[in-house]
Image (cartoon, helix red, strand yellow):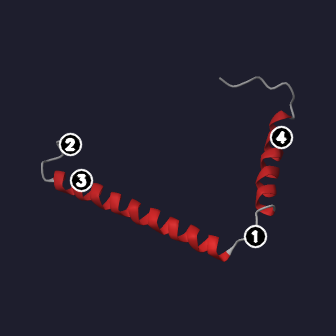
Amino acid sequence: MLPTVSSPFALAKTFVFRRYLTVRNRIAAPTTNPVAEAARKARKLLKKRAKDERLRNFFGWCEGCAGYGSIF
């Protein structure tokens, strides 16, 4: 259920405020530490490899079941 809008400018104010928060977070972001950046990239790579493995297993299962004439 959508709340009632008390002002015709309420949606515009919400839009501007959200953009302000986004810009503020990007500007106020701490300077990147090379060690922290390398650790973040390593975590992302590990997460991507795990996802790729899950997808390989899933699609391999789908291909194996395709031989049964789409009963699954």
Residue 53, horizontal then vertical, whole percent: 34, 62
Q: Callout 1 environment at 10 Å: few (<14), some (14 to 19), or many (20+)?
A: few
Mark 2 or 1: the one toward you: 1
- Residue 31's disc number: 1
Q: Residue at x 82, y 45 (%)?
A: 17
Q: How far apart are marks 1 and 3 (CA)?
A: 45 Å
Q: Callout 4 environment at 10 Å: few (<14), some (14 to 19), or many (20+)?
A: few
Q: Which is nearer the N-term, disc 2 or disc 1?
A: 1
- Type of amino acid at the residue the image marks with label 4: Ala
> What secondary structure is marked by label 3?
helix
Position of the C terminus, as image quadrant, is top left
Mark 1 or 4: the one toward you: 1
Residue 69, horizontal then vertical, whole percent: 14, 47
Residue at mark 2: 72
Q: How far apart are marks 2 and 1 (CA)?
A: 51 Å
- Residue 62's disc number: 3
> What secondary structure is marked by label 4?
helix
Q: Which is nearer the N-term, disc 4 or disc 3?
A: 4
Quarter assignment of residue 31: bottom right
Q: Residue at x 83, y 46 (%)?
A: 16
Q: Distance between the residues labelled 4 and 2?
A: 49 Å
> What secondary structure is marked by label 1?
loop
